[in-house]
Image: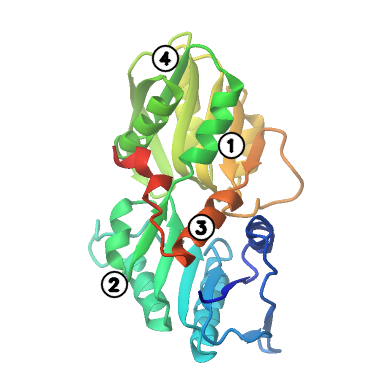
Amino acid sequence: MKKLSVLGGNANPELTREICQVLGIKQTEVLVGRFSEGEIRVHIKENIRGQDVFIVQPTCPPVNDNLMELLIMIDAARRASADRITAVIPYFGYARQDRKDQPRVPITAKLVANLIVAAGVNRVLTMDLHASQLQGFFDIPVDHLYAINVLAEHIKERKIPDLVVVSPDVGGIKMARAYAKRLNAILAIVDKRRMSPEKTEVMHILGDVKNKNVVMIDDIIATGGSLIDAVRALKSFGARDIIACASHGVLSGPARERIASCDGLTEVVVTNSIPLQGPGPSVKIKQMSIAPLLAEAITRTHKSESISSLFEEIRN
């Protein structure tokens, strides 16, 4: 069998180290730095000729720097004669612009997918895309994992009584239903209207949340504005403790301050697909590791085994 090689850039070095620890292998040494004028410099310092190479690099903030690092690392691995290159992208940036919903706007999700394929990658391993149809933007195999195994287990261990799983919008119903099934809870939906890319207005709550403990499921928490609006609406409808779970904690702009000052929000649970931004820890934000999930997917991909069991519950 071809030798397994795992390397990563500057986007999330701690996650790369954790994955290698779970796999029980030494991380492939790579230099990812800058030339004096700011151009990205990559040098893979070990022989990877004929190896099965996995490059761990979420395209999180700073998005453009991390995306270019990924593309250049892929090119370096291809020119170093790697046998197969898999881009492990726990968080896929530019995913929110996935269609032309206004005149004269780009479809950047497709553009970025084209760039990654053109760089020379053979397959992509990602997690909780903003929209599942983004898999079709790639002309190569895409394995789409879900954080439900990590986040739902954390909630289940809490043994929360009178639990309701809430979807923040209609588009998240399928995912919220999978969590409700796993947690043996009922389902509710936040009916909201999007005023702009960063602002929404909550119209109504579909379902009974009065005197219930709520777990709200989303894929991304960016500025936290939509989250706080939903929490206030849920509290106005009589909800008790509210926990928010999101696969990707972007937490940009005033997100941390909004979360810290929101009295109705008990806890925010995110994965380490993205390193937590901002100074210091937050008592309300808990980060769960997806390293075991990614390591298992990498192992099965390397051995040409099925990984469908890692996301069977979402498809049902």
Distance, label 3 to label 2, CA atoms, is 19 Å
Frontmost of labels 1 and 4 is: 1
Q: Quadrant of residue 305?
A: bottom left
Amino acid found under the numbered disc labelled 2? Asp
Secondary structure under tag 3 reads loop
Looking at the picture, which amino acid does disc 1 mark?
A: Val
Q: Is residue 106 visible?
A: no
Choose the circle earlier in sequence order: 3 or 2. 3
Residue that carries the numbered disc 3 in the rendered image: 90
* Residue 200 screen position, x and y as percent: 39, 38
Q: Distance of mark 1 from mark 2, alpha carbons?
A: 33 Å
Whole-Å distance between the Cαs marked 1 and 4?
A: 20 Å
Q: Which residue carries the number 4 mark?
A: 209
Which comes sooner in the sequence, label 1 or label 3?
3
Which residue is rendered at x = 45% and y = 63% of the image? 301
Question: Is residue 276 found left or right of 136 in the rendered image?
Answer: right
Query: Which residue carries the number 2 mark?
Result: 139
